[in-house]
Image (spheres, rainbow, N blue to C red):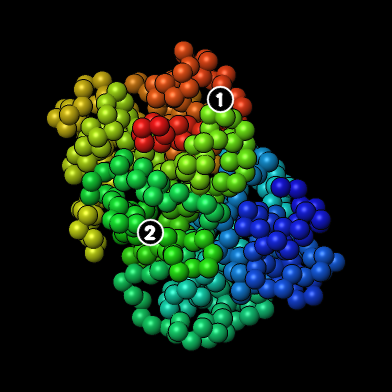
Amino acid sequence: MKLDLASCHQALQARDARFDGRFYVGVSSTGIYCRPVCPARTPRAANCDFFPHAAAAERAGYRPCLRCRPELAPGLAPMDAPDRLARQACARIEAGALDAASLMALAAELGVSERHLRRVVEEATGASPVDLAQTRRLLLAKQLLTDTALPMAVVAQTAGFGSLRRFNHLFQSRYGLAPGRLRRASPERAETPVPDRIELRLAYRPPLAWPALLEFLAGRGAAGVEAAVGPCYLRTVQLAGRRGWLAVQPDVEAARPQLRVQLSAGLLPVLSAVLQRLRRLLDLDANPEAIAAQLGRDARLAPLLAATPGLRVPGAFDGFELALRAVLGQQVTVKAATTLFGRFAARYGEPAQSPFAELRYHAPTAERVAEAPRQALIELGLTGRRAETVQRLARAMAEGQLRLEPGADPEATLVAMQELPGIGPWTAHYVAMRALGWPDAFPDGDLALLKALAAPNARALREAAEAWRPWRAYAAIHFWRSLAMGG
């Protein structure tokens, strides 16, 4: 959105949740910056400065509000940033790319100069890449201090700071408040030994069709890797050598829309990356009001939007896991594909330990599957050609030739995927929808979509879908759900 004073202040006065995470307001009379849904008294327009990102507010000298907690605000959706390179860079930074590597290394990875990358990111966000990374670490630390009883040294390490001294200095200088004072403001959060699990909150823009999202994920996951128990989503996690589990469900007691997340303590060293992957799996950074406003102009979609408001495009926790599931699902039923995926998890996934009987395995990795003999894959129930496709996909990802994650270039990824034997446009677009989080991906050859729109061919379907840009993936998920529900 364009950050003009009048429109931002009107949204602030209304505490309109649709703008939460889309801008932040710095109040000059207090030196604090807030979310537009902050319950504090609305400041005068003359005392307000508006920023597109929390890092830009902090760069201007503002401290985060302790009431509305900017670290809980929904992030910007992939289509919100005006520049593709900026979106790619921000996604990598949010995943921790600058925690262990330099800006020069990130620029080289993205194929641009360090100077150009810095300029593009600053134009898109109002803050430098280093500012973005530092704000991400500080806000994660602030959330841990407020929501958990983790020891201070563990908070600093989990948030990505090299030392407790460095963390204390940056927190004090940026927020004007010692970390210990923030914790003492919450007596129930007195430090205790590291527990076996922690609990955090993830915010989102309402509405959220949680039952529909849960049904989709559980129906297409691998038995033993992920499951739905009542309103709770469960899954195992392995990332950067760390293994554990997580459980997510709506926080029905919260005043604002948010999910309650429990994670095993073994995931603390990779917590930032886990939370980011979880947000993209559940599509929590989507703006359902903006999507509905666009798609609702179509008479075929309007009743579907009304029937399931807040329907999200389920993402992917791991790109290879999703791509493998998509390949296994070619030309077979959802149930048959899920059975095949479960066999892969049992054969090539490592055993998992969790408090949930439903979670028994970690998802198979690209490296493990790439080493599997073709005959072993055939014995799981694959044809020879499908086994070759799985092998080539696993090797491409294990060797870094293919990246399936948000921030990757959609067009280039679609081309790269279709160069692999056995992967056509439908599979490539399905993976782009979910693993890349690309909201405009659209499998125009999908038989169910052709049926739903009574389109004679893929070309006619593409033409009909032009009006849905840039949210074609959301249109597809609504039609799929309608057909599944017998609509």
- Residue placed under numbered mark 2 in the picture: 248
Which mark, residue 184?
none
x%, y% of residue 238?
33, 53
Q: Residue at x 67, y 39 (%)?
A: 83
Q: Is residue 122 above or below residue 140?
A: above
Verify CB contact (< 8 Å) between mark 1 and mark 2: no
Identify the residue shown where x is 24% and y is 64%. 355
Label 2, secondary structure: give it: strand
Give the vertical position of 228 relative to 85 (above or below): below
Q: Quadrant of the C terminus?
A: top left
Q: Toward which corner of the image does residue 273 lie, by quadrant? A: bottom left
Is residue 388 in view from this perspective?
A: no
Residue type at mark 2? Val
Tell me which residue sits at (45%, 57%) in the image: 275
Label 1 sits on what residue type? Ala
- Mark 1 or mark 2: whose residue is earlier in sequence: 2
**Circle 2 crowding by C-alpha within 10 Å: few under 14, some 14–19, many from 20:** many
Q: To which residue does mark 1 refer?
A: 465
Q: Residue furthest left?
A: 379
> Residue 48 location in percent, x, y?
79, 65
Locate residue 42, reporting x and y percent. 74, 69
Residue at the location (44% across, 39% down)? 435
